[in-house]
Amino acid sequence: MTKIPACFSETYAEARAKFLSAAKAAGATLETHEHPAKGPGGETLATDVARIGPADAKSVIALGAGTHGVEGYCGSGLQIALLETGFADRLPEGSALVLIHAINPFGFAWSRRVNEDNVDLNRNFIDHDAPYPENPGYEELKDVINLPDLEPGTIKQAQEKLLAYAEKNGFPALQYAMSAGQYAHPGGVQFGGNGPTWSHLTLKDIVRKHFAPAERIVFIDLHTGLGPRGHGEIISTAAPDSPTYKRMTDLWGNEVLSTKAEGSVSSNVAGSITDFLAEELDGKALAACGLEFGTLPITEVSFALQADNWLWQNGGAENPRAQEVGAIIRGAFYIDEDDWKEEVFKRAEEVAVKGLKGLE
Ligand SMILES: [Zn+2]
């Protein structure tokens, strides 16, 4: 019997080694996209792809981990647990499983949600030649979202201003301001980038190689940080009247929540990977979702992002508070407790198994 909590790791380096070993044991073909930077221990950073099933499969189910760096602690554990519990044996004849480990390896290794350029990768898949979406709420709040220091008085004052904004404009407006991305402040929280990042270009290569030759693609991008502890919400960035959304509800029923309608834990964000897949794989039978697992209350998660951004604008790993802030952000996106790991695995497995119907 696979011990599920043992599939999760303490560091990126451990996660990568375990993933590669579980993939080899499951008979996967492996490919490595090495990142130009190194990890905190000088280790290689890479996006690794494990594929099980024929190279010319017409049906592909894929799971992505670590789009948001530090969220990879969860996603990696889930991918390894799926490999070790024999998920690949459940694939319909002739179809393939593709696991993409550490889509943003720098963020994973250095415990950041963003990448080496301070970019939120899930806001980066946008047309960088067109005018960027505006985020007036962010502009209004930028001096309190981006903390000048981490003194208790500064934090308290900032939180009061954010709350006052929510009271005036509604909580969803605050969440939008803080999470929907911005393209004007490269050193600020929630920067979406001013061009395609390394992870963006790497994922594009992977998608063209592994998904484009198929006709039916199911993609589950594993995320953490929103929603009740341990709960796994299936998020679609497709509009509720689109064919992609219809395919998703065929697989997962009314549990699918669109960011373009009410009810999702996520804001309606631009530049996500699932939007990119819908565009890149237009005309194919695609069901692409985010599977978002709850960790801590949203106020704590938001503060973790603010503290992390402050740290990396002030020396990053060289800052004397690096350990402390690193633990805050890691704790906001990964619950290092066995019951949480068991619960998120059960849910991920359920969603992946239901996704297999999309391969037929
Ligand atoms: Zn995420």
Image: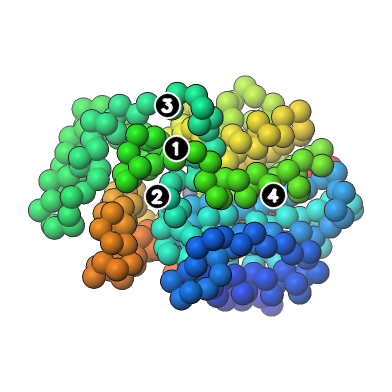
Alpha carbon of mark 4 to alpha carbon of mark 2: how far? 22 Å
Q: Rounded to the nearest whole Å, what is the CA distance between mark 2 and mark 3? A: 18 Å
Residue 316 lies left or right of residue 115; in this view the side is left
Give the Cα distance between marks 3 and 1: 12 Å
Q: Earlier in the sequence, mark 3 or mark 1?
A: 3
> Which image quadrant: the C terminus?
top right
Q: Residue at x 24, y 45 (%)?
A: 146
Q: Using residue 289 as the reference point, say whether residue 208 is left or right of it.
A: right
Residue where numbered disc 1 is placed: 194
Relative depth, front residue between 105 and 33: 33
- 94 shown above or below 172: below
Residue at x 76% of width, y 55% of height:
97
Residue 118, label in figure: 2
Judging by the rendered image, the residue that carries numbered circle 3 is 133
Q: Residue furthest toward the front? A: 36
Q: Amino acid at mark 1?
A: Asn
**Residue identifier under label 4:** 206
Which quadrant of the figure has residue 54? bottom right
Give the residue drawn at x 25%, y 58%.
314
Q: Quadrant of the N terminus?
A: bottom right
Dot placed on the residue nearer the N-terminal end, 2 or 1: 2
Looking at the image, which residue sits at the far right? 93
Q: Amino acid at mark 2?
A: Asn
SS category of the residue bearing label 3: loop
Furthest toward the left, the residue is 153
User: What amino acid does circle 4 point to?
Assistant: Ile
Q: CA distance from mark 2 to mark 1?
A: 11 Å
Mark 2 Cβ and ligand 1 under 8 Å apart: no
Q: Nearer the viewer, mark 1 or mark 4?
A: 1
* Callout in the foreground (2, 1): 1
- Percent position (x, y) of residue 297? 34, 52
Q: Amino acid at mark 3?
A: Pro
